[in-house]
Amino acid sequence: MFPFPAPLRRRTLRPVLSLVLALAAAFALPARATVDDSHSAAMEAAVPAVKLGFKIRQEYWKGTLKSGEQKAVRQQLFKGNEYWFFLGTDAEEATLKIDVYDKKGIKVTVETKAGENNAAVRVVAPATGTYTVVFTLISKENAEIPWALAYGYR
Amino acid sequence: MPRFSGAALCKNAGSTGYFPRNLLLLANLPFFPPAMTACSLFRAVPTVSAALALAFMASGVHAQQPKPHAVVKPVVKEKPAEVPPAPPAADKVVQDKGAGELDLTQFPGQVIGEVIVPVPSEVFTVLDKLGDPDWKSEVAESPKVNFSDRTDVALLLGSIVADGFIAVQAEDKKTVENVGRSVLSLSRTLGVEKDVIRHCQAITDAADKANWDGVRQELDATQSTVRGRMEEMQDGAAAECISVGGWLRGTQVITNVIGKSYSTERAELLFQPDLADYFNDSLEEMLSKAKNPDKLKDIANGLARLRELMDNGGENITPNAVREMHEITTVLVKKITTRN
């Protein structure tokens, strides 16, 4: 079954296994950290809103975009609620832009904020219905830029 | 089916864990209870990953150091990128039509077709602002029924989590605790008990202290954890049933509350046709796999009718429409919470 004797197999596999584990860790952990850092960046933008009583939804959405590409997310909002959407990225020197539009494509953004690697937009839903959150990230790097989107409401 | 199936988008239900840039900062936020933060971190590094991390550290490479917080400043005017980025393809960007308008029909980006389903507390927050409904009369006893089919269990779980939100509105400790127990039992059937147990304990603890915001947060977290775990288990279709069950039970109660004290403003809360569409689409995939397709067909038909009533050609949702929506959801919730 094995092309080499069992004792040799044990001796050889142990360092090989360690090397594989180390390599896997070297490549896998930063990948996880990169994407999650985007969420952390979004959460940094959320701190002032939390102090004002906004509840932040635990679930968040994430992915990657090329520089300049747009992404849209549709969301049911309720009249009477106030929302903050928080966009974060791990990319250095990225410019983030986020806005919210109603079903007719009219911007309903009330306020925007931008940080080092995050941006946020506040919306007071003028009517109950589906809205579209449109965002884009611009960076000198044209590779896939990680992003994370979260929101809070009160 | 994951809610978002686009390759570039992966919904994180909060259960995959993460390494926040500044743990202390997050631990201080009310929406990250300390236990949850710690658990998230350690869950993100199960035994194998821990071995990997140790090997990683032994290799001389260090984990990322926390970066200083980014200062959030109001935008005065749009700042151009210091280094001109590679221009995106012209057909990938929808230009603003001016006056803050965007032609969404021409949007070529990766539009996420589905709609993000709100958490129940978003709706209850609005209702609280519109008055002080008699939530106590809306509290229901947790159904005691055993299902083996995962779709049935997921629908029931969603409905029971919604019961938890209603009990919170009514500040009913006993029902909240019962909901916690039922959720744990159903999670066991779904094979996600270990992930949920800490939430259930937190729900009970928060209810004991009458920390209703804490209970709401934990109920949100419970639903999100179960959904996330089920999606990891390639059981996204059943995960969607949790949302369907919760939404139907929530709509049943809200239509009753609105019906008792109707106003066009209150009824507007029910304008959720895209959600009804979204759930209906989700059910299509489940129909082929379900052991009890009749139940799902009934729910799909009910959702189609709810969608018509919600949209109403752009007109206000009438008292009659609210009544019919309540009747439909009552029938569907009964199907979800009983065997026959």
Image (tube, rainbow, N blue to C red):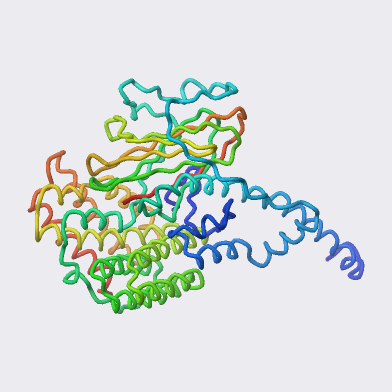
Which of B142 and B99 lies nearest the eye of the viewer?
B99
Query: x and y percent of residue B96 in the render?
Result: 37, 23
Q: Which residue is at a point 48% across and 42% down the rendered structure image?
A: B6
Left or right: B177 in relation to B139: right
* Quadrant assignment, res A72: top left
Against B171, residue B217 (above or below) is: above
Query: x and y percent of residue B194 in the render?
Result: 51, 72
Query: x and y percent of residue B118 in the render?
Result: 33, 52
Q: Which residue is at a point 40% across and 54% down the rendered structure image?
A: A57
Left or right: B270 in relation to A75: left
Left or right: A150 in relation to B81: left
Query: x and y percent of residue A94 in the render?
Result: 56, 32
Q: Which residue is at a point 32% across and 72% down the rendered structure image?
A: B210
Asked if one can make out residue B106 in the rendered structure from this viewpoint, the answer is yes
Which of B104 and A118 lies nearest the eye of the viewer?
A118
Left or right: B141 in relation to B76: left
What is the count of numbered marks? 0
Against B326, residue A42 (above or below) is: above
Asked if one can make out residue B7 in the rendered structure from this viewpoint, the answer is no
Q: Which residue is at a point 38% across and 57% down the rendered structure image?
A: B240
Quarter occupied by the C terminus of chain B: bottom left
* Quadrant assignment, res A4: bottom right
Against A14, residue B123 (above or below) is: above
